[in-house]
Amino acid sequence: MTMEMTVSEARSRLGDVLDQARLQRQPVFLTRRGKRVGVIASIEQWPGPVEQVATNEQVAQQIAQLRELAASMIAPGIEPLLNPSEFYETRQPRL
């Protein structure tokens, strides 16, 4: 049996809705003005991989690597006069 409820109803009872989706192993479809706009499902029902969110440090490392790559593409084989990080913002990324 397919379960449907409005977004506002789900918002007011989110914990109950999550428990219902998990225990009954059935998705709960969210509606707005009679049309389906979202779904709440248990993690076991999720069809894709569950990925870990990157830490700020990991994101900063990836940004540094991309900056080095970009600098090497501008003038390959020529040593840059300035540190590539001086061309970009150095603040920590917001997640």
Image: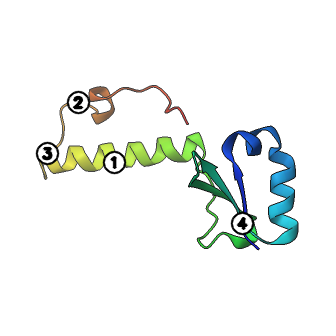
User: Residue type at mark 2?
Assistant: Leu
Earlier along the polypeptide chain: callout 3 or callout 2? Answer: 3
Check disc 1 and give the amino acid type. Answer: Leu
**Count of picture labels:** 4
Q: Nearer the viewer, residue 28 or 22?
A: 28
Q: Secondary structure at mark 4?
A: loop
Residue bearing the label numbered 3: 74
Q: Which residue is identified by label 1? A: 66
In the rendered structure, find residue 82 and report the number of the disc placed on it. Answer: 2
Q: What is the three-letter code of the residue carrying label 3?
A: Ile
Residue at 85% x, 47% y is 15
> In percent of the image, x 71 and y 72: which residue is there?
45
Q: Is residue 11 above or below residue 92?
A: below
Q: Nearer the viewer, mark 2 or mark 1?
A: 1
Out of 78 and 9, give the one closest to the viewer: 9
The local crowd at label 2, few if under 14, some if 14 to 19, many if 20 or more residues have their Cα within 10 Å, is: few
Q: Mark 1 or mark 4, which is nearer to you?
A: 4
Of tags 2 and 4, which is closer to the observer?
4
Q: CA distance from mark 1 to mark 4?
A: 40 Å
| Mark 1 / mark 4, whichever is N-terminal | 4
The dot on residue 27 is 4
Secondary structure beneath disc 3?
Answer: helix
